[in-house]
Image: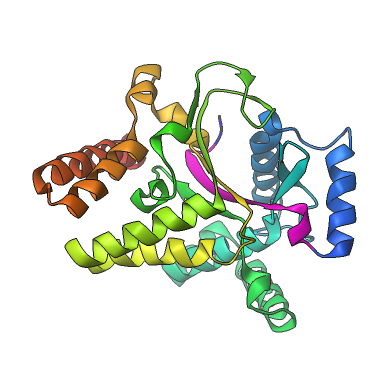
Amino acid sequence: MLPYAAYLRVYEPLAAFTPPERVSWAAYAEAADRPRRASALRAEHGEAVRRILGVPPAPAPAQESPNAYLRRVEDVLYVCPWQSRLRSWLAFSRFRGATPERLMERFVPTSVAEQTADDFDRFKRRGDSASLRTHIRTSTWHVPTSWFVPFDGNERWLVLDGRESPGGTTTTRNLIYVTSMAHARRRSARALQIVRRHVGAAAVTSEVEDLARWLEEFHPHSLVELDYGGIVHLMDDEKLQDDQSVAELGAALTGLETGEEELAFAMYRRVILRWRSIQLLESAN
């Protein structure tokens, strides 16, 4: 079973990378033994499990992952690097900051935790702000409301059994949205303008602002993908078919913009209650 996590990914065109990286990713795309889309999540999860079950556990891999998620649109190759080492460092830093020191030892020996933090500090000193940019964001047990903003309901791709996806890859049971960076940025900017004017809640505004800033860090011709990942295992087929969170949030924003406040509240409430019920499963016994 995959972890109950959803993913927001940015795929940049090959032209966005440095010349050496272009050569490397082009060769990677032609490699026969690279993880394919249908098995990539399992491969990525398997690597993480083996590290954590090691003695002692390894919070981050020793080297950066050479793997990536790929998409082809016509003749253009789009690349979303896994960045397993960087994402592990960032996740471990958040985990360490949120966990009392007396409990950390139960998860990771102090010496290993300190070595991991030192390795990350050295990496940050050697790089620049761009070196900390991740192409993948992860959310466990739910999909953050702000993640629906960049997409349109018509970009929804639901798979209840294995078949070919629009990107030309075989997928397992999943729910995916894919859009262009231009659409994602425009929708995020509109949503930010609406919530600033009509909502004013600092938390909501901050989430949309953070998403909009993150999208601005990538090539303007990139693709943006929302992948429900392992979250689909918390939802039966009927719930997945009924899940129109992107369209409902879009209707809520339009309602605010046009003064239809009752419609806006009803649509937003549907999204919030749906995902609150799923997120509560984290603490169910």
> Which residue is located at x 25 percent, y 61 percent?
195
Q: In this view, does 77 lie to the left or right of 217?
A: right
Task: Tell me the chief SS of the magenta region.
Answer: strand
Where does the image place residue 182, in percent across and percent down from the top left?
53, 54
| Residue 14 is inside the magenta segment | yes
The N terminus appears in which quarter of the rendering?
A: top right
Where does the image place residue 272, in percent across and percent down from the top left?
24, 43
The C terminus appears in which quarter of the rendering?
A: top left
Up-down: is 45 above or below 165? Answer: below
Q: In this view, does 152 lie to the left or right of 66?
A: left
Q: Is residue 195 visible?
A: yes
Q: How many marks?
A: 0
Q: Can residue 201 be seen in this view?
A: no
> Which residue is located at x 66 percent, y 63 percent?
86
Q: In this view, does 230 lie to the left or right of 12?
A: left
> Which residue is located at x 59 percent, y 61 percent?
108
Q: Is residue 155 left or right of residue 135?
A: left
Q: What stretch is highlighted in magenta?
A: 3-17
Up-down: is 152 above or below 21? Answer: above
